[in-house]
Amino acid sequence: MAIALATTREEILRCFPVMAELRPHLKEAEFVGRVKRQQRAGYQLAFLTDKGHVMALAGYRYSESLSWGKFMYVDDLITAEKSRSHGYGQKLFKWLVAQAKARDCDQLHLDSGVHRFGAHRFYLASRMDIIAHHFAVKLK
């Protein structure tokens, strides 16, 4: 198993099938461009491979706020459905925590859709707390 950052077009494209499980609205033809645009603003895409196959990935960024101090925000965290319960998600999550600590972050945050019960069990088992409700309004 190995974890790397997707920086090249080819690496980013390798992540698309797994990302599409979490974000089915994404189009493969637009994926690399969207990721590259976000990377210019600080987004990073990490992927875990086993025997050459992408098993899990995480999109994240660093920020700072008055309420949370310096923090890592995980935008995307997914293990391929066929690869769940093999420790890939836990290995990637521990790697994220180590990265956040190495950058001297005070906290690690993520939001999770209310319907993602399996993910919630994983986050709670990973010692995360539910600390807020997230509200949104669609503008388009």
Image (cartoon, helix red, strand yellow):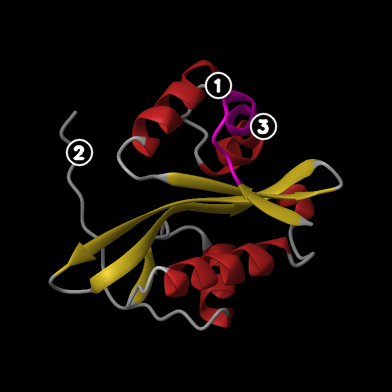
**Dot 1: few (<14), some (14–19), or many (≥20) neighbours within 10 Å?**
few
Note whether 10 is above or below 85 in the view shown.
Answer: above
Query: Of callouts 3 and 2, which one flags the residue occurring earlier in the amino acid sequence?
Result: 3
CA gap, disc 1 to disc 2? Answer: 24 Å
Observer able to see residue 69? yes
Q: Nearer the viewer, residue 124 or 32?
A: 32
Residue 111 at x, y = what percent? 37, 61
**Dot 3: few (<14), some (14–19), or many (≥20) neighbours within 10 Å?**
some
Query: Of callouts 1 and 2, which one flags the residue occurring earlier in the amino acid sequence?
Result: 1
List the residue tagged with mark 1. 28
Given the image, on which type of amino acid does mark 1 rest?
Answer: Glu
Q: Which residues are magenta?
A: 5-13
Q: Secondary structure at mark 3?
A: helix
Q: Which mark is residue 138?
A: 2
Residue 42's image quarter?
Answer: top left
Please give the name of the residue rendered at 37% of the width and 77% of the height, measured from the top-left corner. Answer: 130
Q: Nearer the viewer, mark 1 or mark 2?
A: 1
CA gap, disc 3 to disc 2? Answer: 30 Å
Please give the name of the residue rendered at 56% of the width and 79% of the height, measured from the top-left corner. Answer: 126
List the residue tagged with mark 3. 14
